[in-house]
Amino acid sequence: MLQQYTYSSPAGNLPYVVYTPLNYRADTSVPLLVMLHGCTQSAADFAAGTQMNLVAEEHNFIVVYPQQVRKNNSLYCWNWFDLANQSRDHGEPAMIVGIVQDILQNTAQWTIDTARIYVAGISAGAAMSVILGATYPDIFAAIGIHSGLEYQALKSHHGALTISKRGGPDPLQQGLAAYEAMGSYARIVPTIVFHGTKDTVINITNGDQVVQQWMQTDMLASHDTYVADFNAPATATTYKIPTGYAYTVYTWQNSRGKTIQEYWKVNGLGHAWSGGNSSGSYTDSRGPSASEALYAFFMHHSMHRKAIHPTAFFKHVLHNVKGFLPIK
């Protein structure tokens, strides 16, 4: 069941759509997945293309699709490249977290497991997912990045085309920047990354950099207890879709053998949601299902926190909020 809502804050209003499985009961504690669309897309378009609602129906979790508005960006892009949207308690990240807060507090409709809140997106939505992982590591248990970019690949809209085609700054440097953005909330944030080798919009170099950036961030957040080498994954397994693309899944693990990072490189995939449905834009059904892979990865990662009522949880999270900066 899809329901439309609007989030209101001093920074402005954002519509959002929530999908609730048909057999869900409001007193059942379940995960929440935030899905962030790409440029020129809508929440409905992204839901149709990713088919994430079907995954939610099968596995019983809630999905929310925040919707960018034309007032904020004429192409409906999340403004990931704007410095005002790259820190905690400001701009678009704070508004998206505000949407999560609305859902958590609406206990008549849903009961959300606060240890299992996740965010994923494509393109500009993927870049915003990276920002949310860095700025709200105490909220998002793990993040998914499909055809995205590293943290602070840009700090203004100038140079976006060059970065997209050639890659961003040194990922070790950006890894440090993301760690610093975490502040006192710093922790390992598990990541799953998808990228097509034929992506002409955001070159796969950016996918490599996202993985390397999070390796550095997680190493710093773990105080060197998690150390990974991009060139020496724990596993590297190649598969083939019978009527589609070959792809390789790389994993990196901690000292206990738990996978912290996954990187899915899909040979031949362009700038499109892997395994998506043609009813939505920027999809390619010939790749492995990114939606199923996201769910599987996320379910292996949850926050280590005691059960806490959603209202109390967000009072804890937001007690230092000084207000929102306007979105430019």
Image (tube, rainbow, N blue to C red):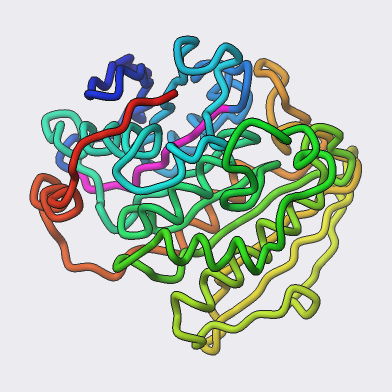
Q: Indicate whether residue 161 is drawn in magenta.
A: no
- Residue situated in front as seen by the camera: 53 or 204: 204
Query: As displayed, is residue 250 above or below residue 311?
Result: below
Q: Quadrant of the N terminus?
A: top left
Q: How many marks?
A: 0
x then y, percent, for residue 305: 23, 68
Q: Is residue 136 left or right of residue 159?
A: left
Q: Quadrant of residue 102?
A: top left
Magenta-highlighted residues? 28-37
Residue at 10 percent of width and 45 percent of height = 311
- Residue situated in front as seen by the camera: 79 or 159: 159
Q: Quadrant of residue 67?
A: top left
Q: Is residue 56 left or right of residue 264?
A: left
Query: As displayed, is residue 82 above or below residue 49?
Result: below
Q: Is residue 194 left or right of residue 246?
A: left
Query: As displayed, is residue 304 above or below residue 101?
Result: below
Residue at 13 percent of width and 58 percent of height = 308
Q: Is residue 82 left or right of residue 185?
A: right
x then y, percent, for residue 228: 65, 80
x then y, percent, for residue 266: 82, 48
Predominant secondary structure, magenta span:
strand
Residue at 83 percent of width and 35 percent of height = 270
x then y, percent, for residue 328: 44, 23
Residue at 51 percent of width and 72 percent of height = 218
